[in-house]
Image (tube, rainbow, N blue to C red):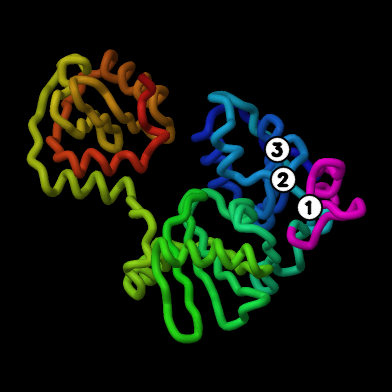
Amino acid sequence: MKKIYSKTGGLTDLKNTISFLQNFTGYIEIENNILFYNDSDLIFSTNNGKKSDLRTILKKLPVVFTIQVYECHSKDSLNMIIENKLDDRKNETLKNGKISESTKIKSDNKKEGIILNQYNDLYNFVGTGLYEINLISKKYKLDAGTLIFNNSEELYALYATKNKTIEGRRALGKIKTLFAVSELTGFIKKISIDTYNNYLEKYPKAILKTYISFDNLINSIKEKNKFKIIKNDSLMNILTECPSLIEVNEGIYIVSKHNSPIYAFYKNYEGDKAYRYIKNQCIFENIEFKIYNMNNDEFKKFKEFKGNKLKK
């Protein structure tokens, strides 16, 4: 095991770090949290030595924190580290000083599946991007569930029995109920947007939440709406009362409403930090702003990008 990377930053830096780790087996330490990875798949996460799902960890992180990445040379060495890092006095997944089978990495998780005892266990195996989880019940062998997560949030749910297929919220409810009465095996893998679209074509009512691509949203607004150009004016003067998309430069945007900036997009930075960089650029460069008016429905779609919202 060796440290391969260290950085002090924020949530965007963490996401970028994770996205660059290819075929990675090891763990990431963030303050009192540890994320364990096998072949770049998140398999387990802890907070203060206790099992915790990724979504809970991300919500509790401070604005600035230290990221430390450690690489392991094998799955066995990672298993040993997991066992040593967990607090066996507090963590329910440990039994008699040994790590439970639902946590330990098997020779091939994707083929053998992972034993899941409760619904919240799923959050330990999903992370940034799209993940597909196929669930098989030990008790009801003819029933099966499929979930797709995007950035650790449920996006799509399907529940199939011998006689029918249930989609959407009802399917999600069925899957959660199944956890209460049966042990489940999960087969988990990261998927592409094309694979997700194939699911949508077959079962469109299974969607729980609309998946919005930033590039697609921007292109859609540009295609539907005319723009006006303002040259060499101050940023504060061009903020609009009605919802607008302001293109500062290629790939750099502000969403404006009530003469205030609401969202900012600058490279890999989020929210307030992105806006500070944009303001500095506007001070030192002559900018040609392109302003696209938006309707309220288009404006509401930016809620998907919570990290880019400015704090008031």
Helix, strand or loop at mark 3: strand
Left or right: 248 in relation to 240: right
Camera-nearest label, 1 or 3: 1
Q: Are marks 3 and 2 in contact (CB under 8 Å)?
A: no
| Residue 95 among those drawn in magenta | yes
Q: Please report whichever mark, 1 or 3, sits nearer to the chain's N-terminal start.
A: 3
Q: Are marks 1 and 3 in contact (CB under 8 Å)?
A: no
Query: Residue placed at 34% from the left, 33% from the top?
Result: 265
Residue 149 - label = none
Q: Amino acid at mark 1?
A: Thr
User: Neighbour class for label 3 at 10 Å: few (<14), some, many (≥20)?
Assistant: some
293 is higher (above) or lower (below) than 180 = above
| Residue 207 among those drawn in magenta | no
Work out which residue is located at the far right of the displayed protein and give it.
Answer: 96
Residue 27, quarter of the rendered image: top right
Query: Residue placed at 18% from the left, 45% from the top?
Result: 221
Viewer-side residue, 160 vs 61: 160
Q: Are marks 1 and 2 in contact (CB under 8 Å)?
A: yes
Residue hosting label 3: 47
Residue hosting label 2: 51
- Which range is magenta? 80-102
Left or right: 283 in relation to 244: right
Viewer-side residue, 52 vs 255: 52
Helix, strand or loop at mark 1: loop
Residue hosting label 1: 93
